Amino acid sequence: MGPNGEQVGIVSIHDALKLAQEADLDLVEVAATARPPVCKLMDYGKFKYESAMKAREARKNQAHTIIKEIKLRPKIDPHDYETKKGHVVRFLKAGDKVKVTIMFRGREQSRPELGFRLLQKLAEDVTELGFVESQPKQDGRNMIMVIGPHKKKAEAKAEKAAAKAQRGGEEPSPGEEASAPSEEVSAQEA
């Protein structure tokens, strides 16, 4: 193949190298298993650079899955439970997975059903935002459950950006409100 993608036909290796040298390009073997092998005249450095840029763009648009972890104890106070549940809700709204760990100490290890009930209650409380990805299972002194979000990370980011844009268009941010009165005071003093 020529530098512009045109068919050159079957050419000896010596002639192909001469064509590449004249065009100041590289002779790159595209399909080695074909009979005869298919080669192309191209600027190989430019080709590698463009393919690296495409790969970088693909990675930029890719959503990274992050697993957040919340640790609880079986005998947790209702207020503390609500606080931890609030963290789980925030993580799920952001599109992150949540690993909920219940730590058992001493005699608590003989009552794993307490931890299981607590995990089931938490799963029921956040069912509108996420689903149980892996069921609760005992792992030594800990019981672990993973909750995955219903919406993807990219969807959560887009939703957050839309809400921020909507808020920005309707009312000034708190920083803007605070700076306006101070300018008026300084103008009155002068």
Image (spheres, rainbow, N blue to C red):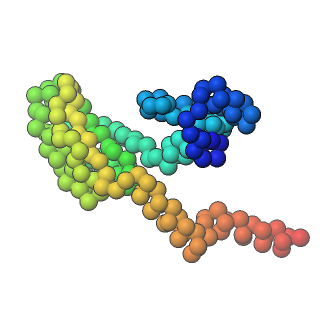
Q: Is residue 1 left or right of residue 113?
A: right
Quarter of the N terminus within the rendering: top right
Residue 23 in the image, given as x and y percentages of width and height: 73, 37
Residue 144, given in percent of the width and then of the height, sits at 23, 35
For this orientation, the residue located farthest to the right is 190
Q: Is residue 95 above or below residue 75?
A: below
Would you say residue 61 is visible in this rendering?
yes
How many marks on residues?
0
Report the residue at 49% width, 31% height from top: 37
Q: Is residue 45 visible?
A: no
Indicate whether 173 appears above or below 63: below
Camera-nearest residue between 124 and 25? 25
Task: Classify residue 130 as left or right of residue 64.
Answer: left
Q: Which residue appears at 71% of the width and 65% of the height? A: 179
Q: Quarter-wise, where is residue 150 in the image?
A: bottom left
Q: Quadrant of the C terminus?
A: bottom right
Position of 110 relative to 23 (above/below): above
Query: 88 or 6: which is nearer to us?
Result: 6
Q: Nearer the viewer, residue 154 or 96?
A: 154
Q: Quadrant of residue 71?
A: top left
- Does residue 181 appear left or right of residue 150 in this picture? right
Q: Residue at x 50, y 43 (%)?
A: 59
The x and y percentages for residue 61 are: 50, 49
